Image (spheres, rainbow, N blue to C red):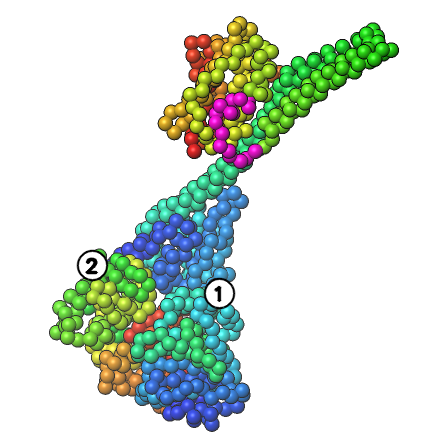
């Protein structure tokens, strides 16, 4: 999919380093000072802004990763309201998609997008956005910024995929008896926040009165139960004292559990994701490892996060470039099934 | 135990996804979406049976379209809850019959896993079938309602045409009556003109005037002049009659302020002579003199119709000392005209039907059965009043109630 991954501290460097006639995917850390991408007629560029970017085992809040597409890959931006404008050919084996992480269309977009994929195409991706949790135009090309849009990179090269989160049920199952979009109103017919608060305060010394909501919710995400499969993690982002707002939609009457994990279990899950991804890779040659990890895991693991990256790096031969982004929602379809929008999950792609 | 718990939870979610809409496609799409997400279905299709063409059509496809070619149109050999294997794609297909319809799922799973998934869907298949029936019944009900609405529209349209036809017939009948009334009005003046001209002819034929003397010439001139004046006055009367009729029958959609007494007099100018010739005495009692604001011509036509009916029945029953009493009264904000005859009244079994269209007791030649129907329409729908019919000790009584103001 990509033939060269480079890191730049400043946008000015791009002007010099980008090769004539090539296409580049730019991953831009949200604190990188830049107004616009230098316009060059001889280079095709699409980019997205993330809370942080990952390059060679480190995360950066400032800087740009420029991933040069190989000649058999294509890249374009589509409106998330109209995924049917995407027409993949049967030869496509892998897709990287970066969506607007705060779009309300993510689930519908992914559902229709999945229906259009060729039978064996694997997909990896993540949600772009900033940590201020406000929807802004974070997808861009050389001409403009886009909101509610998605970058689609398609390639004939195969990829390996691994998806793991490491969360385990603390209490449950519960029924989400009332939901509106991404707002969970009732759990077991009671105010969702009341049920959530009671379960967490019973398990820990954390108190919602004295601790910011997101600090607690990072530690205790919700898990949607699936048959014979791992939980689908949904992270609460805020509350009004009775409802809980989640990243991503939740269907009414979904069966939920409140999840919990220890740091070493999260890191172990990341390692497993990398191992699964590597084992899933059909080809022998590994060009790089693309890590799409949740920004919440970064905040939660804090100084230990470097161990998560290290665990992933260790799963690959030495000198394999591990790069990617800390995202707002992760995307993958590991087993040919529908594309899922995950939270608090580690998605590893072997390219 | 863990597996059973998961099965139960998934079953709960899938059952909750059934019957969320009465639109079949919407309901099925939602169910397939939830079921697929929970069980890892790669694609699923809903085949709906068309009982008219006895064939299956694809209602919806969920999941990857790339698997479309794995779905074959259901046949009679297809077995419910059968799991088949497609070697080429290395995929399993699960077939579930829902009433006459079929759902087929594509899985990448082991046979054991599929058996458990099958057990989940089997546990609520009858509920799904009922929900599908509910959607289809709902659709049928909508279609029935639409057919009903269409039929009502057709009937309303037919009735409008019928009304137009009735109106046309009524106009023709009115014209016939008008000609008859003109004939009555003209008979006497025409007779007089004829008499005067005959007298002129007789006197000139018999040489009654001596033109050789100045006196004879003068007498002739005077005679001719008087005769011509008479003829002139009769012709003026004829012209006046024609004007009356023209004014009376010309369509006038303007309301005007008028007393009921004026309306009765206008009517009698038209039909009075005919009544007089038939020996019918008209008696008018006026107890109300305030003006009302109404469609004068239309009300006059109604009065005329009732008087004409009275005349016809009096003639038919050969009533001696026939009389019609017209009474004008007022009751609070209403003014009424009662027209009462002494022709014996309306038979009891006929009375409830006299305002129905095409109802007539007159011989076929004379009655259209539209007069009173049109009268009722004019008074009640056009003028916002009321028309009533009853029997008195001696005859029939019609009352027109009209609002003041």
- Say which chain tag 1 marks: B
- Judge left or right: residue B322 versus residue B39: right
Mark 2 surroundings within 10 Å by alpha-carbon count, few (fewer than 14), some (14 through 19), many (20 or more): some
Q: Residue at x 60, y 15 (%)?
A: B274
State whether residue B259 is above or below residue A57. above
Residue B373 showing in the rendered view:
no
What is the C-alpha distance between the residues marked 2 and 1? Answer: 43 Å
The numbered dot on residue A190 is 2
Mark in front: 2 vs 1? 2
Mark 1 surroundings within 10 Å by alpha-carbon count, few (fewer than 14), some (14 through 19), many (20 or more): some
State the image coordinates of residue A69 (x, y, percent, origin top left). 48, 84
State the image coordinates of residue B266 (x, y, percent, origin top left). 55, 23
What is the secondary structure assignment of the residue under circle 2? Answer: strand
**Magenta span covers which residues?**
B252-267
Q: Residue at x 50, y 61 (%)?
A: B69
What is the secondary structure assignment of the residue under circle 1? Answer: helix
Which residue bears the numbered disc 1? B66
Judge whether residue A350 is colored magenta: no
Q: Outermost residue toward the top?
A: B320
Residue A218 showing in the rendered view:
yes
State whether residue B12 is above or below residue A288. above
Q: Residue at x 38, y 45 (%)?
A: B134
The numbered dot on residue A244 is none
- Frontmost residue, B176 versus B124: B176
Q: Outermost residue toward the front?
A: B214
- Say which chain tag 2 marks: A
State the image coordinates of residue B309 (x, y, percent, origin top left). 54, 16
């Amino acid at each position: 999919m990509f033939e060269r991954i480079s890191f730049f501290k400043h946008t000015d460097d791009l002007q010099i380093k980008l090769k004539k006639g090539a296409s580049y995917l730019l991953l831009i850390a949200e604190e990188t000072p830049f107004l616009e991408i230098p316009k060059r007629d001889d280079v095709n560029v699409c980019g997205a802004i993330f809370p942080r970017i990952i390059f060679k085992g480190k995360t950066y809040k400032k800087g740009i990763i420029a991933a040069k597409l190989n000649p058999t890959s294509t890249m374009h931006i589509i409106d998330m309201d109209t995924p049917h404008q995407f027409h993949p050919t049967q030869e496509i084996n892998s897709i990287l998609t970066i969506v607007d992480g705060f779009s309300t269309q993510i689930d519908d977009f992914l559902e229709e997008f999945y229906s259009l994929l060729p039978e064996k195409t694997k997909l990896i991706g993540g949600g772009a956005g900033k940590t201020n949790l406000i929807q802004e135009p974070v997808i861009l090309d050389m001409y403009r910024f886009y909101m509610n849009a998605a970058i689609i990179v398609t390639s004939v090269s195969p990829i390996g995929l691994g998806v793991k989160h490491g969360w385990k049920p603390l209490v449950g199952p519960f029924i989400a008896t009332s939901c509106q979009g991404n707002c969970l109103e009732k759990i077991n017919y009671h105010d969702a926040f009341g049920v959530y608060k009671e379960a967490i305060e019973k398990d820990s010394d954390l108190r919602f009165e004295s601790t910011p909501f997101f600090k607690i919710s990072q530690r205790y995400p919700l898990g949607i139960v699936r048959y014979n499969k791992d939980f689908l993690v949904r992270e609460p982002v805020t509350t009004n004292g009775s409802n809980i707002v989640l990243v991503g939609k939740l269907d009414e009457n979904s069966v939920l559990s409140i999840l919990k994990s220890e740091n070493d279990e999260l890191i172990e899950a990341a390692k497993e994701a990398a191992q699964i991804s590597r084992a899933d890779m059909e080809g022998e040659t590994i060009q790089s490892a693309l890590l799409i990890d949740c920004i919440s895991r970064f905040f939660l693991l804090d100084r230990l996060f470097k161990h998560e990256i290290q665990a992933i790096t260790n799963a690959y031969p030495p000198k394999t470039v591990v790069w990617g982004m800390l995202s707002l929602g992760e995307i993958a379809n590991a087993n040919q099934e529908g594309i899922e929008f995950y939270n608090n999950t580690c998605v590893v792609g072997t390219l | 135990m863990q597996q059973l718990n998961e099965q139960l939870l998934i079953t709960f979610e899938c059952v909750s996804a059934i019957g969320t809409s009465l639109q079949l496609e919407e309901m099925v799409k939602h169910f397939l979406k939830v079921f697929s997400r929970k069980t890892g279905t790669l694609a699923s299709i809903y085949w709906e049976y068309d009982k008219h063409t006895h064939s299956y059509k694809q209602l919806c496809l969920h999941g990857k379209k790339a698997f479309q070619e794995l779905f074959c149109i259901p046949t009679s050999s297809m077995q419910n809850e059968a799991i088949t294997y497609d070697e080429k794609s290395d995929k399993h297909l699960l077939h579930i019959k829902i009433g006459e319809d079929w759902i087929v799922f594509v899985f990448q799973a082991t046979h054991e896993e599929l058996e458990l998934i099958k057990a989940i869907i089997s546990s609520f298949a009858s509920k799904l079938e009922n929900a599908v029936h509910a959607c289809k019944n709902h659709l049928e009900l909508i279609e029935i309602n639409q057919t009903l609405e269409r039929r009502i529209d057709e009937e309303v349209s037919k009735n409008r045409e019928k009304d137009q036809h009735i109106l046309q017939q009524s106009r023709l009948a009115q014209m016939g009556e008008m000609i008859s009334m003109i004939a009555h009005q003209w008979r006497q003046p025409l007779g007089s003109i004829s008499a005067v001209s005959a007298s002129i002819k007789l006197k000139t034929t018999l040489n009654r005037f001596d033109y050789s003397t100045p006196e004879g010439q003068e007498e002739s001139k005077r005679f001719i002049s008087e005769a011509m004046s008479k003829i002139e006055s009769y012709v003026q009367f004829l012209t006046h009659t024609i004007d009356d009729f023209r004014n009376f029958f010309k369509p006038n959609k303007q309301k005007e302020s008028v007393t009921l007494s004026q309306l009765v007099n206008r009517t009698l100018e038209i039909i009075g002579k005919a009544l007089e010739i038939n020996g019918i005495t008209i008696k008018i009692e006026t107890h109300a003199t305030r003006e009302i604001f109404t469609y004068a011509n239309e009300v006059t036509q109604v009065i005329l119709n009732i008087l004409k009916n009275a005349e016809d029945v009096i003639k038919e029953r050969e009533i001696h000392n026939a009389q019609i009493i017209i009474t004008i009264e007022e009751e609070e904000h209403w003014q009424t005209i009662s027209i009462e005859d002494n022709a014996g009244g309306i038979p009891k079994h006929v009375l409830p039907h006299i305002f129905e269209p095409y109802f007539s007791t007159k011989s076929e030649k004379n009655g259209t059965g539209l007069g009173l129907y049109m009268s009722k329409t004019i008074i009640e729908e056009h003028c916002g009043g009321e028309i009533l019919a009853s029997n008195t000790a001696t005859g029939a009584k019609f009352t027109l109630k009209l609002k003041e103001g």
